[in-house]
């Protein structure tokens, strides 16, 4: 791994030991994303991963696999890595990772369940929105129907995951509808946490070009806050679910459990 390469990981994993598994993103085509534009996608050799583990602290309790989507390496390699973690870091009770819905589609429920039993306990997945037209506009590479299918598969395998949603992604005039449709998607599966991110326009992305061409107009603050409020109002979770806007990109930072904190969360959004 290049020592100058940026490493991205969720803020929940700030105190977690990081284990590089892939470099870059196997997809790398989302219109709003600049994270891995300069990195060519590659797998870290298994021997390097094992050396990393051999030199690690055996009392480590939590490991986060780094790379945009380490699950892209496939079942056999994932299994080997989790077995190596068991062998060298025996007290580790939770391995977590980013994953894309495309990655998950490569695995059968049985394989996901096997990985769970080997210690893979949390995935962070970018759903972004439940609207197919916006998923297409942002070149996300999946549809809402596929998203629900893969999420249900993870539920079947009892592999927990956090769902990352992006408000503002639908653009001006579209945010409220985006919230309603995204809530409809979320209401169909069990997710541990809904992590909200605010659409940010990064230099050098396709989204910047779309804005210059007039193909996308960013929504203002009020509309984005209304989107968040509408989303909370419309979420009817199958199980208690954490709603979390504490990621640094957010306009406001609120966190609670749905459904019981619904009214409290809504009252915290001052429009
Ligand atoms: S948003 Fe995720 S899947 Fe899309 S290009 Fe960025 S890292 Fe890859």
Image: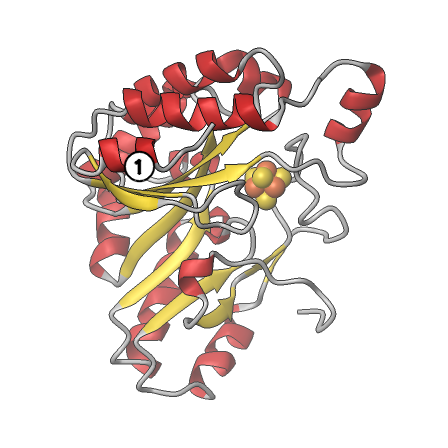
Q: Residue at x 44, y 80 (%)?
A: 53
Q: Nearer the viewer, residue 32 or 72?
A: 32
Furthest residue toward right: 212
Ligand 1 quadrant assignment: top right
- 238 up-or-down from 44: above or below: above
Direction from residue 270 to residue 212 in the image, left or right? right
Q: Nearer the viewer, residue 190 or 28?
A: 190
The reply to whether residue 26 is in sight is: no
Color scheme of the displayed model = secondary structure
Direction from residue 48 to residue 263 in the image, left or right? left
Q: Position of residue 241 (x, y in %)?
A: 23, 40
Q: Residue at x 37, y 59 (%)?
A: 96
Q: Position of residue 225 (x, y in %)?
A: 48, 28
- 144 up-or-down from 52: above or below: above
Q: Quadrant of residue 137?
A: top right
The reply to whether residue 237 is in sight is: yes
Q: Quadrant of residue 237?
A: top left
Q: Nearer the viewer, residue 167 or 223?
A: 223
Q: Residue at x 66, y 69 (%)?
A: 1
The answer as to whether callout 1 falls within 8 Å of ligand 1 is: no
Q: Residue at x 52, y 43 (%)?
A: 250
**Residue tagged 1:** 265
Q: Position of residue 90 (x, y in %)?
A: 26, 80
Q: Nearer the viewer, residue 166 or 67?
A: 166
- 149 up-or-down from 90: above or below: above
Q: How many marks?
A: 1
Mark 1 surroundings: few (<14), some (14-19) or many (≥20) residues within 10 A: many
Q: Position of residue 113 (x, y in %)?
A: 22, 48
What element does badge 1 sit on? helix
- 190 up-or-down from 19: above or below: above
């Amino acid at each position: 791994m290049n020592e100058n390469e940026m490493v991205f990981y969720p803020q929940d994993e700030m105190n977690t030991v990081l284990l590089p598994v892939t470099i870059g993103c196997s997809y790398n085509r989302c219109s709003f994303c600049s994270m891995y534009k300069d990195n060519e996608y590659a797998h870290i050799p298994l021997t390097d991963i094992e050396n990393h583990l051999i030199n690690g602290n055996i009392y480590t309790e939590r490991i986060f696999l780094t790379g945009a989507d380490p699950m892209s390496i496939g079942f056999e390699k994932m299994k080997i890595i989790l077995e190596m973690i068991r062998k060298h870091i025996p007290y580790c009770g939770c391995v977590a990772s980013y994953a894309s819905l495309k990655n998950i589609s490569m695995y059968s429920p049985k394989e996901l369940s096997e990985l769970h039993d080997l210690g893979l306990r949390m995935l962070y997945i970018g759903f972004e929105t439940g609207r197919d037209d916006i998923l297409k506009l942002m070149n996300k590479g999946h549809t809402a129907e596929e998203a629900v299918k893969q999420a249900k598969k993870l539920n079947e395998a009892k592999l927990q995951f956090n769902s990352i949603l992006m408000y503002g992604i639908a653009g001006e005039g579209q945010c409220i509808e985006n919230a309603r449709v995204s809530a409809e998607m979320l209401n169909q599966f069990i997710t541990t946490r809904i992590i909200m991110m605010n659409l940010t326009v990064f230099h050098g992305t396709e989204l910047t070009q779309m804005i210059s061409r007039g193909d996308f107009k960013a929504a203002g603050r009020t509309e984005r806050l209304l989107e968040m409020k509408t989303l909370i109002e419309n979420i009817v979770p199958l199980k208690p679910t954490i709603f979390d806007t504490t990621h640094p990109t957010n306009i406001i930072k609120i966190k609670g459990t749905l459904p019981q904190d619904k009214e409290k969360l809504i009252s915290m959004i001052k429009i």
